[in-house]
Amino acid sequence: MTSPDDKSFSWRQIGPLSELSRKKCRLMYSSDGRDADVCLFYVSGEFFAMDARCAHSGGPLCDGDIEEADVLQVFCPWHDYDFNLRTGKSSTGLQVNT
Ligand code: FES
């Protein structure tokens, strides 16, 4: 748990839920650069955040297809690797931060 005095992160207001729920993924740009950008997913009433770039070769995960079956996962649009929205793990053995 983080404290309000913790300066290692900052909060960003991203808008009302009614706007966020129009798209399943929103790309959040970071002031720390492209490698720190985050995908914010809104799927089945839950939010998930993960690295915006695929762990394989940097594909744009926000543009991937989302599967809402037993496992919630996004498929990278470049080479179709899967990433679990809850854990960031891929069946390929790769991992993105969540
Ligand atoms: S860059 Fe994402 S699977 Fe290759």
Image (cartoon, rainbow, N blue to C red):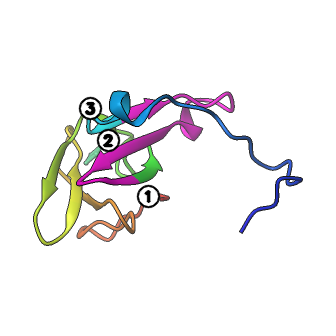
Q: Position of residue 71 (x, y in %)?
A: 19, 69
Q: Position of residue 52 (x, y in %)?
A: 43, 41
Sequence-first tag of 2 and 3: 3
**Badge number at residue 61:** 2
Does dot 1 land on a helix, a strand or a loop?
loop
**Residue located at (32% from left, 71% from top):** 93
Q: Position of residue 81 (x, y in %)?
A: 21, 54
Image quarter of residue 36: top right
Residue under pointer 1 = 96
Residue under pointer 3 = 23
Judged left or right of residue 29, residue 5 is right
Q: Would you say the beta carbon of the disc 2 residue lies within 8 angstroms of ligand 1? A: yes
Q: Which residues are magenta?
A: 26-47
Q: Nearer the viewer, residue 46 or 88?
A: 46
Say if 15 sits above or below 79 in the image.
Answer: above
Query: Disc 2 to disc 3, how far (Cα)?
Result: 14 Å
Q: Nearer the viewer, residue 60 or 84?
A: 84
Q: Position of residue 13 (x, y in %)?
A: 60, 32
Label pair 2/1, CB-CB below 8 angstroms: yes
Sequence-first tag of 2 and 1: 2
**Residue located at (36% from left, 66% from top):** 86
The amino acid on which the numbered mark 2 sits, given as a three-letter code, is Leu
Judged left or right of residue 37, residue 26 is left
Label pair 2/3, CB-CB below 8 angstroms: no
**Badge number at residue 75:** none
The amino acid on which the numbered mark 1 sits, given as a three-letter code, is Val
Q: The N terminus is located in which quarter?
A: bottom right
User: In front: mark 2 or mark 3?
Assistant: 3
Label 3 crowding class (10 Å Cα cut-off): few <14, some 14-19, many 20+?
few
Q: Does the magenta-highlighted stretch encompass residue 31?
A: yes
Does dot 2 land on a helix, a strand or a loop?
helix
Residue 60 in view, yes or no: no
